Image (tube, rainbow, N blue to C red):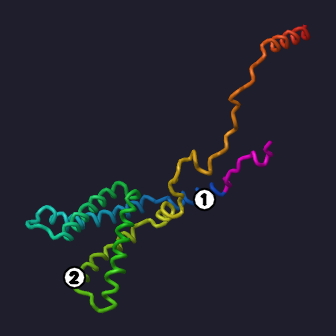
Amino acid sequence: MRSAASATPRYPDTASRWKHRQDTAAAATVSLPRLYFLRFGYLVIAVGLALTKWPLLINHDRPWPLFEGVETCMLVALSLLWFLGLRYPLQMLPVLLFEIAWKFIWMIVVVLPLWTSGQLDPATLSVFYACLVAVIPIAVIPWRYVVAHYVTKPGDPWRSAATGPTQKARPEQDTNPEPIDNASHSNTRTSLTGTTT
């Protein structure tokens, strides 16, 4: 026989969970002016790539070198995602984070060693100046929203709820109920009728 303490399912602290949900919702709220500011950042990057990379994709008159062809096609594809960000500015935030991440990694791994050793060539310096456009995503990204959705928000489950440790205990059902004795039931009704009369 199980004790009452062991039979009672343990539930998490609902008050703390509710407070965490309220804090997350407050941090995740993005105002309409901030959304327009974010859309402006998408528009600037998208138009800049469309003006500089789309003509190369359409009007190139010679076979591209390997790296130049990969770079041009990748940037054209990214420009389409920037235009999509005009409609879904918050859903396309991971693409902006990717834009910031690869530029900073390239500056730290490639540019910084060349600069410290005095070997920074004009071609690398030109690409470095082009990468300074990463200042725009840094300025327009709602960082509180990013932290709330990609840092503090619980992640997607790794396994189904049926096998998870947080499944709530269900009361056991009696699959073999005892049959009702119709004779005793009728006798009880007869005795109750005689008593009332």
Q: Residue at x 34, y 79 (%)?
A: 107
User: Magenta region, mostly helix, strand or loop?
Assistant: loop
* The image quarter in which residue 113 lies: bottom left
**The one of 137 and 70 positioned closer to us in this rendering:** 70
Q: Residue at x 25, y 64 (%)?
A: 74
* The image quarter in which residue 87 lies: bottom left
Q: Is residue 128 magenta?
A: no
Point out the stretch of residues depicted in magenta: 1-15
Q: Is residue 33 above or below residue 68?
A: above
Query: Circle 2: is it few (<14), some (14-19), or many (20+) Cα within 10 Å?
Result: few
Q: Amino acid at mark 2?
A: Ala
**The one of 135 and 193 positioned closer to us in this rendering:** 193
Q: Please identify, in this view, whether the residue under mark 1 or under mark 2 is nearer the observer.
A: 2
* The image quarter in which residue 172 lies: top right
Q: Residue furthest left?
A: 61
Q: Is residue 162 above or below residue 145?
A: above
Q: Residue at x 74, y 46 (%)?
A: 8
Q: Amino acid at mark 1?
A: His
Dot 1 falls on a residue whose secondary structure is: helix
- Residue 123 numbered mark, or none: 2
Dot 2 falls on a residue whose secondary structure is: helix
Q: Is residue 11 magenta?
A: yes
- Residue 163 numbered mark, or none: none
Residue located beneath label 1 in the image? 20
Which circle's residue, 1 or 2, is located before the other in the chain?
1
Q: Quadrant of the N terminus?
A: top right
Give the Cα separation between the discs numbered 1 and 2: 50 Å
Expressed as whole percent of the image width and height from the top left, the position of residue 106 reads 33, 77
Is 69 displayed left or right of 114 in the figure?
left
